[in-house]
Image: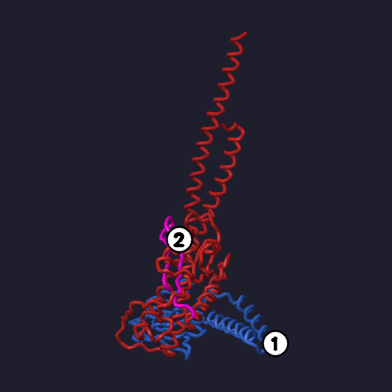
Chain colours: A blue, B red
Amino acid sequence: MSLKLEIVTPQKKIIEEEAIDFVTLPGIEGELGILSEHVPLMTTLDTGVLIYQKGAQRHATAIHWGYAQIENNRVTILAEMAENAEDIDLTRLEIAEKKAKEALSGQFGEDDTEIQRHRKYEAKLSRALVRQAAARMK
Amino acid sequence: MASLKEIRKRIESVKTTQKTTSAMKMVSAAKLKRAQDNFQEATPYASKLKRVVSVLSANFSEEEHPLFARSEGERTAVILITSDRGLCGGFNSNLCKALLKELEEQKIDAAHFTIIGRKGAEYFKRTDHTILQNYTSIPVTEQSVTVKTIVKDHIEKFEKNEIDRVYLAYSHFVSVLTQDPAIQTLLPIEPLPSEELDEREILFEPSAEKILDTLLKKYVENQVAVAWLDSIAGEHGARMTSMDSATKNAGELIDKLQLYYNRTRQAAITSELIEIISGAESL
């Protein structure tokens, strides 16, 4: 038996593939490896890299927050944002990483809006790093 | 009877209008394709999300979550999605009329409106309902942020029991020619028919409650976002059809005016000839 994988985002369907050997997911409580005949599972996904293997080929997709549902050898990913490693533009990411790092090294106050701002840049940085990791994995 | 010069001016003015309407038609046709694609690409996520919610709610008694809680009160909030611009036939007014009728039937006479698009606000300004907020000219890139703010606001109010229900009203794109007014209950969330393909028990990580909480909010958010895309596609469809018929009507009007112009011109020549001939005869 093999797995069927679907990744959708609110904008569009990113991946629909069959005959997949295994998938690893960035689960909120740690990395998850999914093989066929996995028990039904529903989990929240963190920002991270999803990897799936089909035959001898390995694919990586950067995922930012979402849900995964596994049942009957079907893996359905509902991601807020997802990008295939092939489509990732590294130079743009390096700029994004630099910008986020610069912003984070600056001063932050103690009130709520400032904390929010800090979180925003942290999220931006982690997104940039994850996508870079995904792009390097291809 | 209008003078020849007046008729000529009239023809020119109708021709200018025709140029505008046919240009608008072509612009809408191009935008329609984009909007339709956006809408179609968003549907897989929406249907998957719906499925996940229904699988989850199969594992829950629905009363457990506050977003499912029904109450009999009359405090109603409406999220209305219309277009910013007119010249799209009855697109906005059909929806507004249908919504007003629906509210009247349910005897709700002071709903709180959150309106996307200028046209809806213009319509409901004249009624007894209150417009809390009106979002106009939102660029495509700001749409998801706007939806998040609107939905968050409504969910908070609903959870604090400040409102009893939230309706979502928008125009559903059936085809380029038809857009149907759609009015649905956003909150409390209507229980979905639960489906379970796998009889084995589902594992939840972290916990079912936590997943359900964020998932339901996402679900409500997604409904509004998809409705908005649906409405945009409908707007361009409606504008395309109405501009097409306006162009056709202008063409007919030009033909009629041209005929009238020719007749008038001929009549003027004839009467002038008669004058000359009768003048010559009397000599």
Q: Position of residue B132 (x, y in %)?
A: 55, 71
Q: How many marks?
A: 2
Q: Which residue is mark 2?
A: B97
In the image: residue A35, left or right of residue A120: left
- Main secondary structure of the magenta stretch: strand
Instruction: Give, as a three-letter code, the residue at label 2.
Output: Lys
Quick check: is B163 in the magenta stretch? yes
Q: Which residues are magenta?
A: B162-185
Mark whose residue sits in front, 1 or 2: 2
Label 2 crowd bin: few (<14), some (14–19), many (20+), radius 10 Å: some
Chain of the residue that carries numbered disc 2 in the rendered image: B
Between B169 and B123, the residue placed more toward the observer is B123
In the image: residue A114, left or right of residue B178: right
Quick check: is B135 in the magenta stretch? no
Label 1 crowd bin: few (<14), some (14–19), many (20+), radius 10 Å: few
Q: Position of residue B205 (x, y in %)?
A: 43, 89
Q: Which residue is mark 1?
A: A107
Residue B23 versus residue A56 in the image, above or below: above
Query: Which part of the image, by quadrant, shows the C terminus of chain B?
Result: top right
